[in-house]
Image (tube, helix red, strand yellow):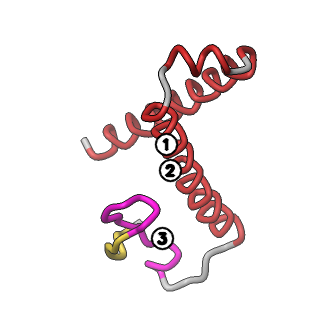
Amino acid sequence: MELQGKYLCPEFRGEVMYKRPEAQAQNRPLDIDEIRLVSDLRIMHSKVDELFQVVSNLKRRHHEADIRRYADEPVLEEDISRVDQIYLWFVSLKEAGLRRTG
């Protein structure tokens, strides 16, 4: 994929580079799987930003001890486990990207 250009993305409060899919670079329309992938990635970016904002607000407004006291403990532990899984997946993507770029 080649870089298409940069512009401000209000959801991420910064400059973001978007890649042009190979299909566009080759002047062909995206197939359905490519469209689904791009759509899923955009949803993921939005949800990651949303989770970041919620957690940031919780940390800013409340003490950790209060969060633990009022949280539904089994649900909180499941949330922590899910975020751990997501984190490990992002780390593997990052490492693969570093290996690719050398």
Q: Does the magenta portion include 2?
A: no
Q: Position of residue 54 (x, y in %)?
A: 54, 42
Q: Which residue corresponds to mark 2?
A: 49
Q: Is residue 45 above or below residue 20?
A: above
Q: Amino acid at mark 3?
A: Glu
Q: Real-space Cα distance between discs 3 and 1?
A: 30 Å
* Numbered marks: total: 3
Q: Nearer the viewer, residue 17 or 35?
A: 17
Q: Position of residue 12 (x, y in %)?
A: 41, 58
The earlier-in-sequence mark between 2 and 3 is: 3
Q: Does the magenta portion include 20?
A: yes
Q: Amino acid at mark 1?
A: Phe
Q: Which residue corresponds to mark 1?
A: 52
Pointers 1 and 2 in contact (CB under 8 A)? yes
Q: Nearer the viewer, mark 2 or mark 3?
A: 2
Q: Position of residue 79 (x, y in %)?
A: 66, 26
Is residue 36 found left or right of 83 in the rendered image?
right
Q: Amino acid at mark 2?
A: Asp
Q: Check disc 3: other Cα within 10 Å, few if <14, some if 14-19, many if 20+.
A: some
* Quadrant location of the N terminus in the rendered image: bottom left
Q: Check disc 1: other Cα within 10 Å, few if <14, some if 14-19, many if 20+.
A: few
Instruction: Read off the magenta span.
Output: 9-26
Q: Is residue 85 above or below residue 6?
A: above
Q: Residue shown at 31%/39% (left/top)?
A: 98
Q: Quadrant of residue 72?
A: top right
Q: Indicate which disc residue 22 carries.
A: 3
Q: Nearer the viewer, mark 3 or mark 1?
A: 1
Q: Nearer the viewer, residue 27 or 11?
A: 11
